[in-house]
């Protein structure tokens, strides 16, 4: 498996840990701590999916960041995460919203759910 995933979370520990666990499972993973870093990474390399925290610090939240990323990479697979009640956030159609703490197996399953359905 050689899938590249972008992990965006302003919690440095969580972003890096998630990326490391994904790499241990055979993925290539890159961590970004904010929208600016994430957009630079997306502009410079291809990603099959993104895991984005809804509650990013700064001017852009995770839902807005996903919209900006999809302007560059239409159809990018994505999972949004939040530490708050999931019903507060309305994810874009087809995007799974997982509440923290999540299981890595749930995260990967949500990201690649279409692969299992085929």
Image: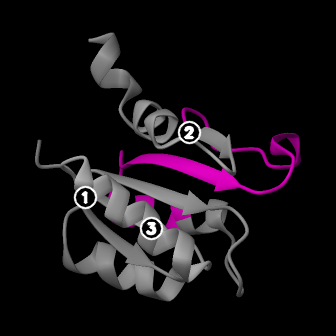
Q: Is residue 20 left or right of residue 106?
A: left
Q: Is residue 6 visible?
A: no
Is residue 100 toward the left or the right of residue 23 in the image? right
Q: Secondary structure at mark 1?
A: helix
- Mark on residue 37? none
x and y percentages locating residue 74 in the rendered image: 35, 52
Q: Farthest top residue? A: 118
Q: Residues within 10 Å of mark 3 (few under 14, many from 20)?
A: some
The colour mode here is: one colour
| Other-residue count near label 1 (Cα within 10 Å), few / some / many at <14 / 14–19 / ≥20 | some
Instruction: Kindly indicate whether the residue at mark 1 contacts the one at mark 3 (C-beta within 8 angstroms).
Output: no
Does residue 79 show up magenta in the picture?
Answer: yes
Residue in view at x 43 percent, y 74 percent? 16
Earlier-in-chain disc, 3 versus 2? 3
Closer to the camera in the image, 65 or 28? 28
Residue 111 position in % (x across, y down): 41, 38
Asked whether, in this view, residue 57 is left or right of residue 75, the answer is right
Quadrant assignment for the C terminus: top left
Residue matched to label 2: 95
98, above or below 114, in the image: below
- Of badges 3 and 2, nearer the viewer stands 3
Quadrant in which the N terminus is drawn: top left
Closer to the camera: disc 1 or disc 2? 1
Disc ID at residue 17: 3
Ranked by sequence position, the earlier of labels 1 and 2 is 1
Q: Real-space Cα distance between discs 3 and 2?
A: 22 Å
Task: State yes or no: residue 118 in magenta.
Answer: no
**Which segment is the magenta one?**
66-95
The answer to whether residue 91 of the structure is visible from this angle is yes
Q: Residue 23: give its label.
A: 1
Q: Residue at x 48, y 41 (%)?
A: 107
């Amino acid at each position: 498996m050689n899938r590249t995933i972008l992990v965006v979370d302003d919690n440095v520990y969580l972003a890096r840990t998630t990326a490391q666990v994904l790499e241990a499972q055979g993925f290539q993973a890159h961590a970004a701590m904010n929208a600016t870093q994430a957009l630079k990474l997306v502009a410079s390399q291809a990603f099959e999916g993104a895991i984005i925290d809804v509650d990013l610090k700064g001017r852009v939240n995770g839902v807005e960041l996903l919209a900006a990323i999809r302007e560059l990479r239409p159809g990018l697979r994505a999972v949004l995460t939040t530490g708050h009640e999931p019903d507060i956030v309305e994810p874009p159609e087809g995007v799974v919203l997982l509440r923290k703490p999540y299981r890595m197996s749930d995260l990967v399953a949500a990201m690649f759910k279409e692969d299992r359905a085929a």
